[in-house]
Image (cartoon, rainbow, N blue to C red):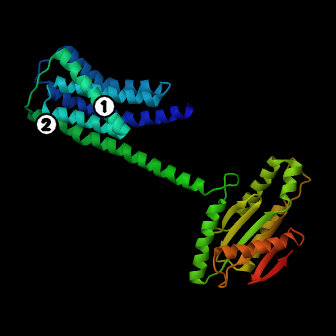
Amino acid sequence: MDNQQGKGLSFAKRIYLPRVIGLGIGCFSVFAGLYPISQPPWVWILLVFNGYVWPHLAYLISTRAAFPYQAERRNLLGDSLFGGFWAAAMQFNPLPTVTILAMMTMNNVAAGGGRLFVRGLLAQLGGVLLAWLLLGPTFTGHTTQLQIYACLPMLTLYPMAVGMVCYQLAIKLAAHKRTLKALSRTDSLTGLLNHGAWKDLLHLKFVKCQQQRGHGTIALIDIDHFKRINDSHGHILGDAVLHQLSRDLKRNLRQGDLAGRYGGDEFCVILPATSLQQASEVMERLRELFGDYRHPGVPQLRVSLSIGLATWHPGLRDAAAWLIEADRALYVAKNTGRNKIASASLPGSLSIAT
């Protein structure tokens, strides 16, 4: 319900300004259409109410309702009812009538599509019948020069107001789309790239290295004995360790390096334009930094990293083969004592740095 109310309030706020502008300047068109006709005083009072009181009253009704979205859609039907009433009260004077009804119909389509369009037409018809019941059915086919000029503000300013609202909505939707796209590529726990996003970027970096014959190194990182940490101290502390590694990665990596969570307690890094030696130095700083971590609730906890490195070389057939070399290097680091870096220094060979 809170979500529906939030969306409804946003909808009401978007409608508010166009309604104030549209009904305010629309009064001039209706006034010009009614001026040559003898109408009772209550009609003029109703016109002032509709043009300058109703927009604010409608906003209060929708924002204070339990379901603002439904309330605002009812307000839009009220606008259409008024529009049909004024069309009949002006005796269907061609230009003022088309101006008022067309602008309200445009508003209904923009706000609610085909369904609100049809309901708006029915509300306009109801307004026409109400006016005929109170004032009698009459028609006029002549539009004066004054009426033409009185309709010009409605034909220019109101579409500009609706267009501005639509533009602002499009900007917000584009921002939301960018946010959702970023979230779809981000690991929710660590804030790093997720598995799929990182592998997509790995493929792009592989192709770039292949085309330019440039340097590039990837690293696979494993938190040593992470399962034991979870089993002994609980998953909350395990999550804190994962958060710490993600923070250390963000602080220690250079601009352009791409870090992701590969899965579980494994992390991955792409280091573009980086030799194996340079990558080893970067990862060694990370290993030492992470090894200094102390959890305030469990001061006796000690953590360490095993890291596998693989540099790009022309013998790699694809990004998957590159990743396999880094994985093999990681396997060596884990099976020769952990807390160290192993590198695939040459195709088919491995070296270990303690």
Q: Nearer the viewer, residue 153 or 269?
A: 269
User: How far across and down, in percent of the image, does residue 221 sit?
Assistant: 77, 66
Mark 2, residue position: 148
Residue 278 percent across, percent down from the top left: 73, 77
Residue type pointed to by label 1: Gly
Q: Is residue 174 depicted above or below 284 in this figure?
A: above
Give the CA separation, mark 2 to mark 1.
25 Å
State the SS at label 1: helix
Q: Quadrant of the N terminus?
A: top right
Tell me which amino acid carries mark 2: Ile
Mark 2 or 1: in front is: 1
Tell whether 32 sits left or right of 174: left
Question: Residue shown at 46%/47% (left/top)?
Answer: 172
Q: Which residue is mark 1?
A: 120
The one of 144 and 105 positioned closer to us in this rendering: 105
- Secondary structure state at the residue bearing disc 2: helix
